[in-house]
Image (cartoon, rainbow, N blue to C red):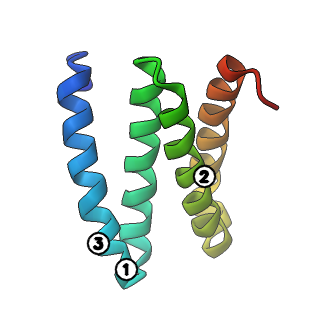
């Protein structure tokens, strides 16, 4: 909600709390929790990119990519879009940081 209202500081606090919860839940190794963790990491990466905190953005997006690749290995058809989206978002960060 805060993210959509462009209240990025509040959104960041909420995303960080959710991220912490999903880290605990993903220890159960369920696909659903891994997906939610990956999406939360992706959201944090996008949030930090928008607020020009590029190193943090890169860190979260790389974590999201790692988890999305695990999901893609389990079910390529289901997670292809998520994998492409995460790679695109990471590319936007790399562009600013001038990385390849």
Q: Is mark 3 on a helix, strand or loop?
A: helix
Q: Is residue 72 above or below residue 38?
A: below
Residue at left 61%, top 59%?
Answer: 66
Q: How crowded is mark 2: few (under 14 residues within 10 Å), some or many (20 or more)?
A: many
Name of the residue lying farthest toward the right: 100
Is the Cβ of the residue at disc 1 closer than 8 Å to that at disc 3? yes
Residue at left 24%, top 52%?
Answer: 18
* Residue 91 screen position, x and y as percent: 69, 30
Residue at which label 1 appears? 27
The Cα atoms of the two marked residues, 1 and 3, are separated by: 6 Å
* Residue 21 screen position, x and y as percent: 24, 63
The Cα atoms of the two marked residues, 3 and 2, are separated by: 19 Å
Quadrant of the image containing the N terminus: top left
Q: How crowded is mark 3: few (under 14 residues within 10 Å), some or many (20 or more)?
A: few
* Total residue callouts: 3
Residue placed most toward the observer, 44 or 72: 44
Q: Is mark 1 on a helix, strand or loop?
A: helix
User: Is 28 displayed left or right of 75 in the figure?
Assistant: left
Residue at which label 3 appears? 24
Q: Which is nearer the N-term, disc 3 or disc 2?
A: 3
User: Is 13 displayed left or right of 71 in the figure?
Assistant: left
Residue placed most toward the observer, 3 or 82: 3
Q: Is mark 2 on a helix, strand or loop?
A: helix
User: Is 61 displayed left or right of 83 in the figure?
Assistant: left
Residue at which label 2 appears? 65
Residue at left 60%, top 52%?
Answer: 65
């Amino acid at each position: 909600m805060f993210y959509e209202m462009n209240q990025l500081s509040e959104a960041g606090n909420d995303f960080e709390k959710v991220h912490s919860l999903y880290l605990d839940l993903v220890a159960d190794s369920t696909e659903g929790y891994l997906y939610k963790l990956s999406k939360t990491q992706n959201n944090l990466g996008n949030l930090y990119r928008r607020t020009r905190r590029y190193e943090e953005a890169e860190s979260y997006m790389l974590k999201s990519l790692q988890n999305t690749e695990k999901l893609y290995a389990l079910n390529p058809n289901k997670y292809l879009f998520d994998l492409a989206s995460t790679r695109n978002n990471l590319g936007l960060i790399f562009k600013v940081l001038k990385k390849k």
